[in-house]
Image: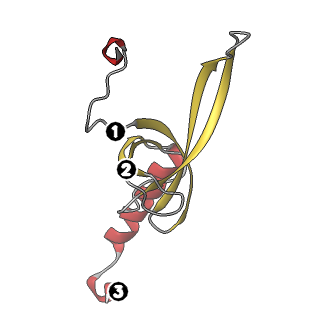
Amino acid sequence: MAEATNIEKVPGQRKVLVGQVVSTKMAKTIVVEVHRQKAHPLYRRVVKRTKKFYAHDEEQTARTGDFVRIEETRPLSKLKRWTLKEIVKRSALAAAAIAAETAAAALKTPEQAS
């Protein structure tokens, strides 16, 4: 019977991956590079595999170099099937850029803003 399989599919469970942002040049889209280690099927040697995923970033908060968690979703475009769930770790350059932006915004006077 088919009931003897060990694989259980739980409805509502979406795949979640952690990777590094390599590009933020598109509007509301980031490119995330995910590294995996997998044993070779014949030789059992551990081989590194890398794959790039296009993910939707609604608020455009992720920066290049950040480590992010992405979640599988319905197709949003030709290549986008993932959404940004959270930023796991900020890169040093991204943290410095955010600090510089907030400092520049704080120095603006209300007259300059309009």
For the residue carrying disc 2, how many other residues have a C-alpha within 10 Å: few (<14), some (14-19), or many (20+)? Answer: some
Which labelled disc corresponds to residue 112? 3
Q: Which residue is mark 1?
A: 14
Query: Quick one: SS at disc 1?
Result: loop
What residue is rendered at 48% in x and 61% in y?
29
Query: Quick one: SS at disc 3?
Result: helix
Give yes or no for contact between labels 1 and 2 (Cβ–Cβ under 8 Å).
yes
Given the current orientation, which residue lies at the most extreme right position? 43
Which quadrant of the structure image shows residue 108?
Answer: bottom left
- Residue 21: image location, x then y, percent: 53, 47
Give above or below for 13 relative to 8: below
What residue is rendered at 35% in x and 18% in y?
2
Residue 42 or 16: which is nearer the viewer?
42
Q: Which residue is mark 2?
A: 73
Q: Amino acid at mark 1?
A: Arg
User: Disc 1 to disc 3, how far (Cα)?
Assistant: 46 Å
Q: Amino acid at mark 2?
A: Thr
What residue is rendered at 29% in x and 35% in y?
13
Q: Amino acid at mark 3?
A: Gln
For the residue carrying disc 3, how many other residues have a C-alpha within 10 Å: few (<14), some (14-19), or many (20+)? Answer: few
User: Disc 1 to disc 2, how far (Cα)?
Assistant: 7 Å
- Residue 39: image location, x then y, percent: 64, 15
- Residue 77: image location, x then y, percent: 48, 63
